[in-house]
């Protein structure tokens, strides 16, 4: 019973199975929902994330838990990025990302693979950067995911994470955001995807997510240096940045 009523509090393999099933169900409507829920702003946040991840670097980029691939495509537009690999454990997501790459004539520069962010199928030091957007709340082991991102990034490369972040204090905007996210998003989600549960899980998963300072400690514990974050979306989101210095 607990599982059914409190999916956001699942852990380990149970959480992974729940998350995979949920994203498989909503994959076909995922892009539409992102655009409706953020008023199209998610493209701007992804672009900024891609810029911060790749500035001054040259080579191949990785986006983990890539979903339908939007951050992978944003990475590819950056100067110095030669190709992008996107990994997600949901086959339906990987297939949509692959179709989008074909439609955009980007099949040569992009590769979308089914794989686990907690056990990335790449050698150490393979990429100039590893990014993740709106995914850290969904992985079942955040420190492991961050440490895998660091492992596959080359020395002087970057790990960059875009995520909704809990607000520190009360105030008008946090209250409005909370109302929007907890009350309206589940309704919009249900209307557009027919899946009320998925878009009830989403706001609850933010409540349990570490705040920006705690997330910074996770990045530092994974061995990342010069850890910092930049708030966007009126403070509702943070772009966390860390470097792999050896
Ligand atoms: C909210 S979506 C974000 C997708 C994409 N990054 C974006 O910006 O739109 C979360 C994604 O994380 C993926 N995911 C969650 N846990 C994962 C894991 N352990 N390995 C790979 N993908 C995972 C889900 O399948 C889903 O596509």
Image: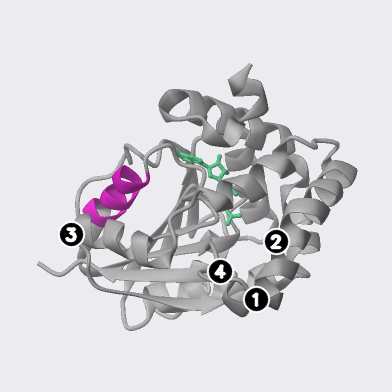
Could you tell me residue 6's position as x and y percent?
Answer: 61, 30
Question: What residue does disc 4 label?
Answer: 237
Identify the image quadrant of residue 134. bottom right
For the residue carrying disc 4, how many other residues have a C-alpha within 10 Å: few (<14), some (14-19), or many (20+)? many
SS state under label 4: strand
Q: What number of labels is visible?
A: 4
Decide which of 244, 202 is in the foreground and name it. Answer: 202
For the residue carrying disc 3, how many other residues have a C-alpha within 10 Å: few (<14), some (14-19), or many (20+)? some
The extreme top residue here reads 1
Question: What residue does disc 3 label?
Answer: 223
The answer to whether 200 appears left or right of 236 in the picture is right
Which label sits in the foreground, 1 or 2? 1
Dots 4 and 2: beta carbons under 8 Å?
Answer: no
Q: Earlier in the sequence, mark 4 or mark 2?
A: 2
Name the chief secondary structure element in magenta: helix
Decide which of 9, 119 is in the foreground and name it. Answer: 9
Residue at figure coordinates x 56%, y 77% from the top left = 232
Question: What residue does disc 1 label?
Answer: 171
Decide which of 19, 117 is in the foreground and name it. Answer: 19
For the residue carrying disc 1, how many other residues have a C-alpha within 10 Å: few (<14), some (14-19), or many (20+)? few
Which label sits in the foreground, 3 or 4? 4
Identify the image quadrant of residue 7. top right
Task: State the separation of the CA atoms marked 1 and 3.
Answer: 35 Å
* Residue 86, disc: none
Which label sits in the foreground, 3 or 2? 2
Report the magenta residues as a range.
142-151
Above or below: residue 95 compared with residue 128: above
Q: Earlier in the sequence, mark 1 or mark 2?
A: 1
Could you tell me residue 25's position as x and y percent?
Answer: 72, 32
The answer to whether 30 appears left or right of 163 in the picture is right
Question: What residue does disc 2 label?
Answer: 178
């Amino acid at each position: 019973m607990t599982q059914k009523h409190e999916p956001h509090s699942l852990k380990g393999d149970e959480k992974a199975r729940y998350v995979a099933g949920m994203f498989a169900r909503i994959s076909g409507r995922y892009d539409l929902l992102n655009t409706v829920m953020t008023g199209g702003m998610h493209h701007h946040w992804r672009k900024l994330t891609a810029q911060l991840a790749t500035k001054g670097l040259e080579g191949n980029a990785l986006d983990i838990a890539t979903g339908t691939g939007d951050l992978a495509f944003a990475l590819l537009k950056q100067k110095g990025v030669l190709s992008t690999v996107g990994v997600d454990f949901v086959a339906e997501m990987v297939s949509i990302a692959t179709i989008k790459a074909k439609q955009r004539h980007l099949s040569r520069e992009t590769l979308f693979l089914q794989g686990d962010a907690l056990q990335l199928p790449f050698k150490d030091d393979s990429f100039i950067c590893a990014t993740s957007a709106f995914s850290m709340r969904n992985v079942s082991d955040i420190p492991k995911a961050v440490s895998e991102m660091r492992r596959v990034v080359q020395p002087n490369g970057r790990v960059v994470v875009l995520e909704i972040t809990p607000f520190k204090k009360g105030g008008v905007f946090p209250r409005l955001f909370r109302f929007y996210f907890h009350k309206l998003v589940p309704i919009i989600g249900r209307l557009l995807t027919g899946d009320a549960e998925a878009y009830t899980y989403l706001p609850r998963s933010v409540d349990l997510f570490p705040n920006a300072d705690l997330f910074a400690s996770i990045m530092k514990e994974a061995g990342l240096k010069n850890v910092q974050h930049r708030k966007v979306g009126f403070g509702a989101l943070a772009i966390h940045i860390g470097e792999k210095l050896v």
